[in-house]
């Protein structure tokens, strides 16, 4: 359910800083309350208060996610170049034992 809410309401959730709340929501009721809050903000945008601290935290989380993704990608590339030696029974990485 969270996937579809994120996909359909992405613009509103990002605009009103609710995307991270939806992603970390523990259950369906919480997601529904966040969607209701988003609808309230869309009807009356004066109710919404932009939170600088939340924006900064989201930017930091995005940076961390990108770094983790880069490390995971490098690891997968390294593992694709590794091969199992049938003679000695160890992993080789470009001629070096791992």
Image (spheres, rainbow, N blue to C red):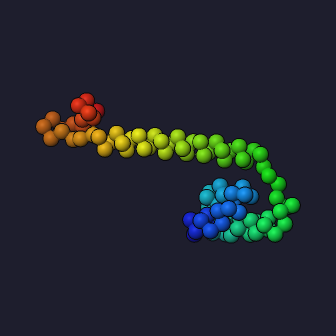
Give the percent coordinates (x, y) of residue 62. 60, 46
Q: Which residue appears farthest toward the front when viewing the image? A: 11
Q: How many marks?
A: 0
Asked whether residue 9 is in view, the answer is: yes
Give the percent coordinates (x, y) of residue 19. 66, 58
Q: Residue at x 66, y 47 (%)?
A: 58
In the picture shown, does residue 48 fall above or below 84? below
Give the percent coordinates (x, y) of residue 79. 32, 42
Q: Is residue 5 left or right of residue 40?
A: left
Q: Residue at x 37, y 44 (%)?
A: 76
Q: Which residue appears farthest toward the right when viewing the image? A: 46
Give the percent coordinates (x, y) of residue 98. 28, 33
Quadrant housing residue 49: bottom right
Is 20 or 66 nearer to us in this picture?
66
Q: Which residue appears farthest toward the top when viewing the image? A: 96
In the picture shown, does residue 32 fall above or below 46? below
Q: Is residue 97 left or right of residue 72?
A: left
Q: Residue at x 42, y 44 (%)?
A: 73
Is 33 or 95 nearer to us in this picture?
95
Quadrant housing residue 95: top left
Quadrant housing residue 78: top left
Q: Is residue 68 left or right of residue 17?
A: left
Q: Which residue appears farthest toward the left when viewing the image? A: 87
The quarter in which the N terminus is drawn is bottom right
Q: Residue at x 39, y 41 (%)?
A: 75
Asked whether residue 33 is in view, the answer is: no
């Amino acid at each position: 359910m969270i996937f579809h809410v994120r996909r359909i309401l992405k613009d509103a959730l990002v605009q009103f800083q609710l995307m991270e709340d939806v992603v970390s929501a523990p259950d369906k009721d919480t997601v529904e309350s966040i969607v209701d809050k988003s609808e309230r903000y869309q009807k009356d945008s004066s109710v919404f208060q932009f939170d600088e601290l939340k924006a900064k935290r989201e930017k930091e989380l995005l940076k961390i996610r990108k770094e983790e993704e880069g490390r995971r990608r490098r690891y997968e590339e390294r593992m694709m170049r590794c091969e199992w030696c049938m003679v000695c029974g160890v992993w080789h990485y470009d001629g070096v034992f791992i």
